[in-house]
Amino acid sequence: MNKLRLALITIVILSSVYSAFAVIDMLSFEASLFDSSGGINI
């Protein structure tokens, strides 16, 4: 019983970690940097 519970908990944890990395791969980030006069710094 304890080994089955440990196996199920391990599977749940690993699948949630895998899902988190899958979401991170789908996200992207883009930003622009402006100076105090409103000009774009590249």
Image (cartoon, rainbow, N blue to C red):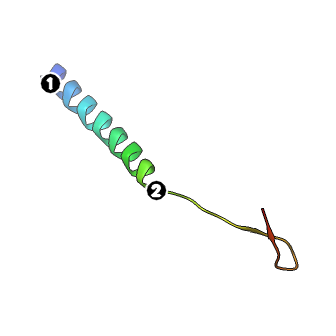
Image disc number at residue 17:
none
Give the quarter of the image for residue 13: top left
* Badge 1: residue crowd in 10 Å (few <14, some 14–19, many ≥20): few
Residue name at image x 18 percent, y 20 percent: 3
Would you say the residues marked 2 and 1 are in contact, meaning their CB atoms lie under 8 Å apart? Answer: no
Residue name at image x 28 percent, y 38 percent: 15
* Residue 5 percent coordinates (x, y): 18, 28
Name the residue that disc number 2 marks. 27
Residue name at image x 34 percent, y 39 percent: 18
Question: Is residue 2 found left or right of 25 in the rendered image?
Answer: left
Q: Nearer the viewer, residue 35 or 19?
A: 35
* Residue 31 percent coordinates (x, y): 65, 64
Amino acid type shown at disc 1? Leu
Farthest-out residue, right:
37
Which quadrant is the N terminus positioned in? top left
Whole-angstrom CA distance, mark 2 to mark 1, is 35 Å
Farthest-out residue, left:
1
* Residue 24 percent coordinates (x, y): 44, 49
